Amino acid sequence: MKRLYLPLLMIALFYSDNLFVTIFPEAAFDGKYMIIPRFFTIGLLFMAVFFDRNTAIKYGFLFGFLFDIFYTGVLGAYMFFLPFVVYVVSKLVKVLQNNLFILSFIFLFGVALLELIMFQLNVLIERTEIDLAQFVSLRLGPTLLLNLIFYLLFAFPLKSAFEKLQRIYND
């Protein structure tokens, strides 16, 4: 029974992105800014650091596939790039110190990397008409701010949850 906690936590984080978009008013800031919650991505990064990187990569692949099916219509975008971001961030954490202050910068780098990859992919397949400067000011900046707030609110609970889950899985 305890082994269901990890999938349930990740499912809750997966749906929290959609729930935030549903609850947050679309006309906030006069509709000028595009704020994208990446709560699931931050949860995946916590999993990679405090639980197991390979499991996080598998979850990134699976949930990236689900994200592609339900939200993007471009099969393979999140399915391949979520695990890639998890891998890059896990390597950065091994090089840099592993405390929550440094992790905030590393995780924001991971979110920014994912956003930039998705933007470039959309430019490549001609699904967007904004340029890089507009993207940075209208989407990337507000997205990083929202996800930093999420990180500050949930860093300690997520860290302790994944550490407890690791103890459960190791027993």
Image (spheres, rainbow, N blue to C red):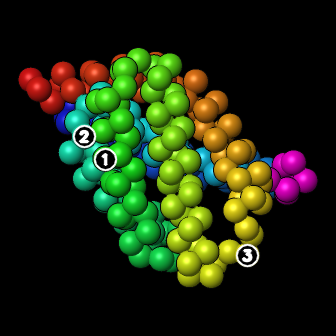
For the residues bearing labels 2 and 1, Cβ distance under 8 angstroms? yes
Q: CA distance from mark 1 to mark 3?
A: 30 Å
Instruction: Classify residue 165 as left or right of residue 81.
Output: left
- In this figure, which residue is indicated by the disc labeled 2? 53
Which residue is pictured at 40% across the width and 60% down the height? Answer: 81
Residue 104 in the image: state x and y as whole percent.
51, 28
Residue 43 in the image: state x and y as whole percent.
42, 38
Crowd class of label 1 (few under 14; some 14 to 19; many from 20; radius 10 Å): some
Mark 3: which amino acid?
Glu
- Label ID, residue 87: 1
Which residue is pictured at 33% across the width and 54% down the height? Answer: 83
Image quadrant holding the C terminus, namely top left
Of the two numbered discs 2 and 1 on the same chain, state the one appearing first in sequence.
2
The reply to whether residue 125 is in sight is yes
Mark 2: which amino acid?
Arg
Which of the two marks, 2 or 3, is nearer to us in this view? 3
Using the image, determine if residue 56 lies above or below residue 104.
below
For the residues bearing labels 1 and 3, Cβ distance under 8 angstroms? no
- Label ID, residue 126: none
Mark 1: which amino acid?
Tyr
Which residue is pictured at 31% across the width and 59% down the height? Answer: 61
Crowd class of label 2 (few under 14; some 14 to 19; many from 20; radius 10 Å): many
For the magenta stretch, what is the residue range?
A: 27-34
- In this figure, which residue is indicated by the disc labeled 3? 129
Element under label 1? helix
Of the two numbered discs 1 and 3 on the same chain, state the one appearing first in sequence.
1
